[in-house]
Image (cartoon, rainbow, N blue to C red):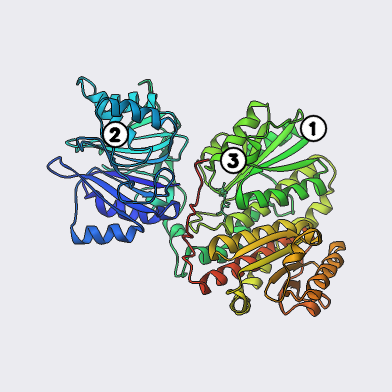
Amino acid sequence: MCGIVGYIGPQNAVPFLIEGLKRLEYRGYDSAGIAVCQADGSLSVRKQVGRLSNLEESLDAEPLSGSPGIGHTRWATHGEPSTLNSHPHLDCSGRVAVVHNGIIENYLSLRADLEAKGHVFQSQTDTEVLPHLIEEILKPGGKSHVEAIREALRLAKGAYALGIVFQGETDAFYAARCGSPLIIGVGDGEQFIASDVPAILNRVKKVIYLNDGEVAELRPSGVTLTRLDGTPTAVVVQEVTLRAEAAERAGFETFMLKEIYEQPRVLRALLDTHVDKNGAVRLDEDAEALLAAEMPDIQRILVLSCGTAYYAGMYGRLLFERWVGIPSETDLGSEFRYREPRLPEHTLVIAVSQSGETADTLASVRLARTMGCKVLSICNVAGSTLLRESDAALPTQAGPEIGVASTKAFTAQLMAFVLLTIRMARLRGIMSEARERELTAELARIPNAIHRVLERQADIRAISQKYYECYNALYLGRRFNYPIALEGALKNKEISYQHAEGYAAGEMKHGPIALINEFLPVVCLCTPTADEVYDKMISNLKEVEARKGRIIAVVTERDDKARAFAQDVIPVPETIEEYSSIVNVIVLQLFAYHNAKARGADIDKPRNLAKSVTVE
Ligand code: M6R
């Protein structure tokens, strides 16, 4: 939620600030702004409501230059999207500029105290208390800028990633983190800050992952880190292995389409990392060690996640029960944290998150940890808070996912669950080596199967052209394809704004059947054919047909039953039921994509959404 960047060095900060914000715009796009310390020490702020291009136009018309500089792209939480509520925010005298990602929870009481002391606020944001607080602390004199920042942050409660510049200080700027992501890019005689690595990928190859409670003082010559009480902390510089091209569109019209097309490669890479030449699954060392220690005692598995990752969790649960034989449940991070959960002893928590920064997932994981649970995370972003707070990880290594709608991270999560559950079943001694080989051999066919679905893009687009004007759509699936029906509906809603419901097909008769008429497209997941729930799906198709619903059936290439009921069919390669989800979801991603395109939506930046939801 919100992206921040910053620069100090011999160059003009502005081009980097704009370039970095462009790469972070997926985090929020309600407004954008920058603050730059000019060569004469004066502090200039420029901000514009709406997309970053508005800010760019304003800078083209009236350029700014200098160093250090900070920038922000906003996803509004406190205060409507407006120029006044845009970051950077200033103190009364315009000497301290702050960009912030997160929420200062006690801002109302801080603001009241400051107003009583004569501070006049311009915005409705929580952030604005910070420059005023720093100004107030500096007033009596005798304190350095970094001391004032630390003191202010000792008073502020909540979550933040911050960039701060001061008027007249051209050789330093500051950053701090508590609960919201922030990294420092270490260059040669220059330093950067950003909310995530892709924003600075083409500038530096070395980064420092700031820890919660640390304040950084950045100078062209280096970085110093301290805790809020002033004690110094060690600076750990890490090499970045991601390539800059990974965050570019590579000729695709949108990041989402590029990411949809990356799926065969991403899944192949995940397989190559974890399946050896004999078809045996091996996880990373920490995951192997955790499972070796915990497997004998695990009584229950609890999968925690939000949004699309939650649907991946529902899929994982089916595998835990079917292959590993351990009772499993899934919960939404936003529900689990408030539901006074009772967890049996030896509950293993599996947290799933693309970003590793989702506030509700993190809070629920922290709660589970207080109850003694070990946590294994399926996560895409190296160095994320979730990974750092987990006992072990299964990195999905899908590369940066920039499109707000999750695609490749989701299929990588599904495959990660397959790998994890095969490994756990083997460790538990309930899956034979031969069965493991059989399952990994079939899994190795999935990237090609996805490729074949991608080749049908033109057909899927043609079908979407018939339905994109409908007000509603219903998505039906059973068992392993029920989470996929939910995911397909979510994908459609979030990028095309066409209302869509995902439903367990067997539940249709308990309510949604009332919606069916000749205007309702009903997307039915009818694969694989050789499966006990297939016949049940056929019965559901008959029920829809009888009420004149318009059936779009995803079927296997050799299917001859389901297609008889459908107005439109999308054939996909056949695989086992457990893997059919990974193939079918590609159809639904493309269907949502072309719906959204036909409806003229901004696919990579759907309205009201942000890529990672770092607030409650
Ligand atoms: O980064 P996370 O996987 O934790 O994010 C969870 C959800 O916010 C995310 O999946 C969201 O639902 C996406 N917009 C779905 O496309």
Query: In the displayed structure, would residue 85 be above or below residue 213?
Result: below
**Eye-nearest disc, 2 or 3:** 2
Q: Which mark is residue 296?
A: 1
Mark 1, other Cα within 10 Å: few <14 / some 14–19 / many ≥20 = few
According to the picture, the residue beneath numbered tag 3 turns out to be 361
Mark 3, other Cα within 10 Å: few <14 / some 14–19 / many ≥20 = many
Q: Which mark is residue 131?
A: 2
Q: Is residue 243 something that shows in the picture? A: yes
Q: Position of residue 59 (x, y in %)?
A: 23, 57
Query: In the displayed structure, would residue 253 be above or below residue 266?
Result: below
Question: Amino acid type of disc 3?
Answer: Thr
Identify the mark nearer the N-term, 1 or 3: 1
Q: CA distance from mark 1 to mark 3?
A: 27 Å
What element does badge 3 sit on? helix
Question: Amino acid type of disc 2?
Answer: Pro
**Is ligand 1 within 8 Å of the beta carbon of the residue shown at mark 3?**
yes
Tell me the quarter of the picture where residue 347 sits: top right
**Left or right position of 128 against 470:** left
**Left or right position of 196 against 371:** left
Q: Which mark is residue 394?
A: none
**Eye-nearest disc, 1 or 3:** 3
Query: In the displayed structure, would residue 546 be above or below residue 212?
Result: below
Query: In the displayed structure, would residue 456 be above or below residue 382?
Result: below
Query: Which residue is at 32% across, 37% downward?
Result: 128
